[in-house]
Image (cartoon, rainbow, N blue to C red):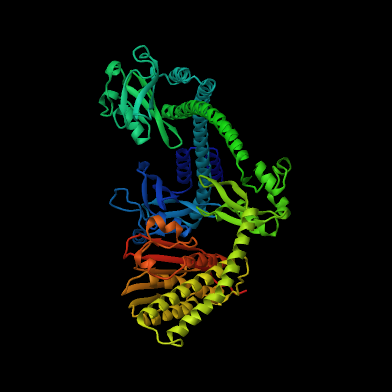
Amino acid sequence: RFSILNQASYQVSTNLDPEQIYVAVHKAAQRLMPVESFVISLLDEETDEVEGVYLVDDDKRAPVTRIPRDQGLSGQVITSGQPLLLHGAETVDQLGGVNYGKPNTPLSILAVPMTLSGKTVGMLSAQSYQPNVYTEDDLQILSTLANQAAVAIQNGRLFNETERLAREFEMRVIERTAQLQREQQNTETLLRILTEVSSSLDLDRALNRTLALLNDAIGAEQGTIMLLNAEDNLLHYRAGYGYLTDKVSGEGRGFKLKIGEGLAGWVVERREPALVSDLPSDPRWVKTGATSHEHRSAIVMPLLVAEDVIGVLMVFHRKPNYFSAELLNLVKAIAGQVAVAINNAHLYELIRDQAERLGSMLRREQEDASRSQAILEAVADGVLVTGPNNRISFLNQSAAKILDLEPGRVIGQSLDVFGGLFGKSAGTWMETISNWSDGPISYEPGDTFAEQLDLENGRIVLVHLAPVILQNDFLGTVSIFRDITHEVEVDRLKSEFVATVSHELRTPMTSIRGYVDVLLMGAAGAVNENQAHFLHIIKNNTERLNILVNDLLDVSRIESGRVTLSPQALDLREIAEDVIGDVLRRSQEENKPMALSLDAPKRLPHVYGDVERVRQIIGNLIDNAYHYTPENGTITVRLHSPNGGNEVQVDVKDNGVGIPVEDQNRVFERFYRGEHPLVLSTPGTGLGLSIVKQIVEMHKGRIWMKSTGVPGDGSIFSFTLPIYEQQ
């Protein structure tokens, strides 16, 4: 037996064919013990099934079978990994013996696991129809044979797998080599086409050469390029090469297609290529002229630049099914290069035209700049221009004279360098320029700046500042200087004169008013009705003259800087309520019914201002509304903080006579009064709104008005005050 085992081991180990291994193991088992039926089963781990790869009964081979792992004798042995020695039909039936179509079943069974590296990979079974045939020695011998068979089968499998992998690798190498050759050819074709289209800006020549190279590379018989015309949005024939070249050639000749029309229009509309094996049977194909019966195969590729379609590249052949998907990819790559070349040519034409236009514009701008500089040099006002970096870029002679600067020394310098020359009063002006230069987003449309500067050289200058904005880009600032030293001196003398006259008028007016009151009381005797009437006229006019004197004194004090503010946190709601209360009492006393209301939130932020001056502002606006609104009118005072900003807005709205549109620009002028009869019949000097505007601006606020000019629609006077911020 040992010799037979050695021979069997040699035969099994030197053979790599699984079938021959199965037969060698079977024959060795027959020489070692009685065997009427022989079974070799292997475990398929992927499907978790047991495959009966070798089943022989009385030297007859049975078909290969598959059973679940948890069924049958094979499943029992493979799952448990333990050998079985069975005798008797009842025991065999319980474990499910193999039925070979005979009426009886094996009565003796040896079944041993095939193990490899401690893992069960299959089963070997020797069976006999005679009872009590096998012994424990037979079990050991069959186990030895099973392990040898497991190693041999595994080696055979590995060998076959290695051969299969080698064949596959060889095929892949061949395929990859062929693919690389094709890719090299395609790359060379692409390189030649790229060289051709990039070496010339003559678009027609480049396109014709490209089509010739493309036809040669893929074996096409006709190549055509159609481009999308921006004017009519149609596809126009642009270039062609092949057997139809003599029939259709030249830009603007040949055919045109709408987007969506024909195969080319379909490709443009869908932005995707088309590979057609038989054009006559394709419903998208439109037959035109010479191509009506000759084209059969086609590749149509969109010419894309970024996301835009600029045309199509088409290649044709007179044989059906000529073009492949691989050629489609090559044409796609070539189409990309062609699209770039066409786009570059268009860009070149555009840049050339643009350069010519820019050259003309530059010449015109140079001429305009020369004229502008001549104009700026000729004006009496000084002009100073800064760039976006806060550096001085222009200073005319008038500005140089006013500011005592030399243009050649300051051009290109930062404005901050000369801050000391402008005096302390120029701080806000320079800060505004710096803020706009450092943060252009801080500029709001319509922002301007005006300030009076007291220069170190003794001049008094009025400066107007405005930013230069071009399409939301900050380009710098322009400052206009006007020497108002003489005007300021004249104004000062005028103010002194007005103040002196006003003071001198107060004393006689006080006497006149006092004596009129005494006469009206009858101190000089009885006063008849006519005398009383004349005395009341004198009294009313002295009161109007007194109001005028007081207003003139206010204007004089404000202009001379003798009005100082005592700013503090103010409750505008409380002030407005007090003023409204005063006007309501006056309405009752004068028997002039008027509806006054206050619209203000409960949590209104405090403002920063002088309490008496703020009361003067609100009082003047409400008084005006009261005076110029007929009986039973409505006056509404609204307090609010727009958009939660840093200021509080006050709106005084009435439904009075309103202000004509043509007069609205003058409402804040001194001594201006409207022509409406109600206005003329109301005492006033025309200085109130002028004083209010100056006081509002002293508080760093703004004031404006709105009116349709239609009587009955009234007016809205609005002003703002900064919100108080606790330090």
Question: Where is residue 711 drawn, in percent x and y?
Answer: 32, 63
Tell me what residue is drawn at x 47 percent, y 75 percent. Answer: 543
Furthest residue toward top: 246
Tell me what residue is drawn at x 39 percent, y 73 percent. Answer: 626
Tell me what residue is drawn at x 56 percent, y 49 percent. Answer: 467
Tell me what residue is drawn at x 39 percent, y 55 percent. Answer: 662
Work out whether residue 174 can be spotted.
no
Query: In screen coordinates, is 592 left or right of 198?
Result: left
Vertical order, 349 against 576 (above or below): above
Dividing the picture into quadrants, the one containing residue 679 is bottom left
Dividing the picture into quadrants, the one containing residue 72 is bottom left
| Nearer-the-camera pick, 92 or 236 | 236
Question: Where is residue 502 drawn, in percent x and y?
Answer: 56, 70
| Nearer-the-camera pick, 56 or 631 | 631
Work out whether residue 258 can be spotted.
yes
Dividing the picture into quadrants, the one containing residue 3 is top right
- Image quadrant for the C terminus? bottom right
Vertical order, 656 against 205 (above or below): below
